[in-house]
Image (cartoon, helix red, strand yellow):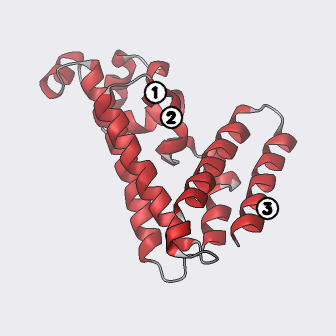
Amino acid sequence: MKVASERFRERGVDGIGMADLMKEAGLTHGGFYKHFNSRAELVAEAIERALRDGSAVADSIAADPKASLGWLIDGYLSLTHRDNIAASCAVTTLAGDVVRSGERARSAYAAQVNRYAELIGKLITTLPAEEKRAPALAALATLVGATAMARAVSDEKLSREILRAAAADLKARLG
């Protein structure tokens, strides 16, 4: 499952065939069907795994007394996060695939979006609790969108500019 969740983040759900995925995972094609009834089941489980990995990161940030919104923004919009797609946030890397997936994957994705919005809301210190939800969702959308755009453009200078602009905007708006 680890291999599948990493490859799907790197290449997309349709970017790797089952035979290649099974080979990388050290399974035979027959071995695959001992574990999963269909490719769709594997995809749903791999997406859930990738999102669980993100939950673990969110939990560690939430438990860190030194965590701040600026620290989260800088980490998410870093070159390291941009370039390490296999281990990066599944909310960014798998959004396009989840749109075309079944309810199981979409529900897991929605739960993770809510989890991240909750985390960001806790890190926003400039607003009262009842006013944090919308800015937290907007911040998450900015983080995800900026990272996706920075990965998609072929111009390194523009990629870095996107990340810097998003970070500066979020910090100016949310402190």
Image quadrant in which you'd find residue 158? top right
* Marks 3 and 1, how far apart at CA: 29 Å
Question: Disc 3 or 2, which lies upstream in sequence?
Answer: 2
In three-dimensional space, the C-alpha distance between marks 1 and 2, rounded to whole angstroms, equals 6 Å
Q: Where is 7 relative to 22, above or below?
A: below
Give the residue drawn at x 79%, y 46%.
Answer: 162
Answer left or right for 111 relative to 158: left
- Residue at 47% in and 43% down: 90
> Residue 57 appears at what percent x and percent y?
44, 61
Q: Amino acid at mark 3?
A: Ala
Q: Earlier in the sequence, mark 3 or mark 1?
A: 1
Q: Amino acid type of disc 2?
A: Ala
Residue type marked 1: Val
- Residue 39 is tagged as none
Q: Residues at badges 1 and 2 in contact (C-beta under 8 Å)?
A: yes
Q: Secondary structure at mark 1?
A: helix
Percent position (x, y) of residue 92? 55, 42
Tag 3 and tag 2, C-beta contact below 8 Å = no
Image label count: 3
Q: In the displayed structure, does residue 124 sit left or right of residue 86?
A: right
Residue 95: which disc? 2
- Residue at the disc numbered 1: 99
Badge 3 is on which residue?
168
Q: Secondary structure at mark 2?
A: helix
